[in-house]
Amino acid sequence: GENVEQHPSTLSVQEGDSAVIKCTYSDSASNYFPWYKQELGKRPQLIIDIRSNVGEKKDQRIAVTLNKTAKHFSLHITETQPEDSAVYFCAARGRNNNDMRFGAGTRLTVKP
Amino acid sequence: DGGITQSPKYLFRKEGQNVTLSCEQNLNHDAMYWYRQDPGQGLRLIYYSQIVNDFQKGDIAEGYSVSREKKESFPLTVTSAQKNPTAFYLCASTSDRYFVGYTFGSGTRLTVV
């Protein structure tokens, strides 16, 4: 099955700076890569996703890039704000819907 | 509440007790999942179900049981065989017809007392 590694585990940035979180996956057949944001004690919420036929996707201050050859994908947050502080999870779907694997999470802190 | 409801929000279990966590969705999703979340370990799959009256073990099914008698409902029982049940439990659902990722419930925090 799929295996996903996520780095860094914690990230602290100043308000207005950019933040980058990276994930690698193992299954070359994986074709769907979502990113979730989870605030303390709350449910993970999908913030952006990318499919394997696309190299980059952007939604306002958030972007995701995918390198299928290297089997890694990254989340980029620009102009960070204190409300961006949360735990971010990457995930990769393997050969079927039930083979979704999550990274261990990155705790992002944006300092005002 | 996002179409998928978990209850209770907090649950306390005594040693040797079985407890059941509820998960209900009104999204008409085919597939439902249970994940366990521990600090620093991400989400680990306990059980999943793609269709009524059928379910499959995930990576950490030991000490847990589920049922899927209705499409909308996928309760999880944490049995006394689960030696370390203190964790945050998340239920999720998705449509098999067009996969757009999971919709998560708000979670149940289970604590052993």
Image (spheres, coloured by chain):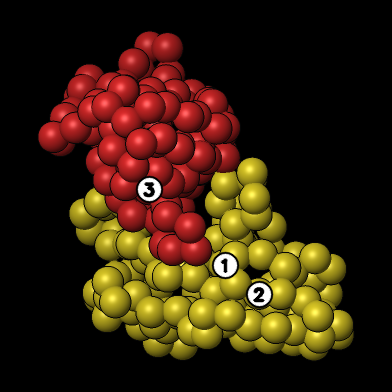
Chain colours: A red, B yellow
Tell me, yes or no, whether the two marked residues, 3 and 1, touch with CB atoms within 8 Å.
no
Marks 3, 2 in one chain:
no
Q: Position of residue A42 (x, y in %)?
A: 44, 63
Cα–Cα gap, marks 3 and 1: 16 Å
Q: Residues within 10 Å of mark 3 (few under 14, many from 20)?
A: many
Residue placed at 27% from the left, 27% from the top? A16
- Give left or right: position of B58 versus A44: right
User: Counting residues from the N terminus, which is met first, the one under dot 2 or under dot 1?
Assistant: 1
Camera-near label (3 vs 1) is 3
Residue B55, how many percent across, how many down?
53, 70
**Residue A96: x %, y % from top left:** 40, 46
Looking at the rendered structure, the kind of residue marked 3 is Lys
Res A103 visible? no
- Residue B16 versus residue B46: which sits nearer the camera? B16
Per the model, the C-alpha gap separating discs 3 and 2 is 22 Å
Residue A37: mark: 3
Residue occupying image coordinates x 70% and y 83%: B12
Q: How many residues crowd mark 1 within 10 Å: few (<14), some (14–19), many (20+)? A: many
Which structural element holds mark 1? Answer: strand
Q: Secondary structure at mark 2?
A: strand
Residue for badge 2 = B110
State the residue position of label 1.
B89
Q: Quadrant of the N terminus of chain B?
A: bottom left
Please check whether the numbered discs 3 and 1 fall on a single chain: no
Question: Is residue A76 shown left or right of residue B83?
Answer: left
The three-letter code of the residue at mark 2 reads: Leu
Image disc number at residue A108: none
Residue closer to the observer: A3 or B87: B87
**Closest to the observer: B54 or A99?**
A99
Distance CA(mark 2)–CA(mark 1): 7 Å
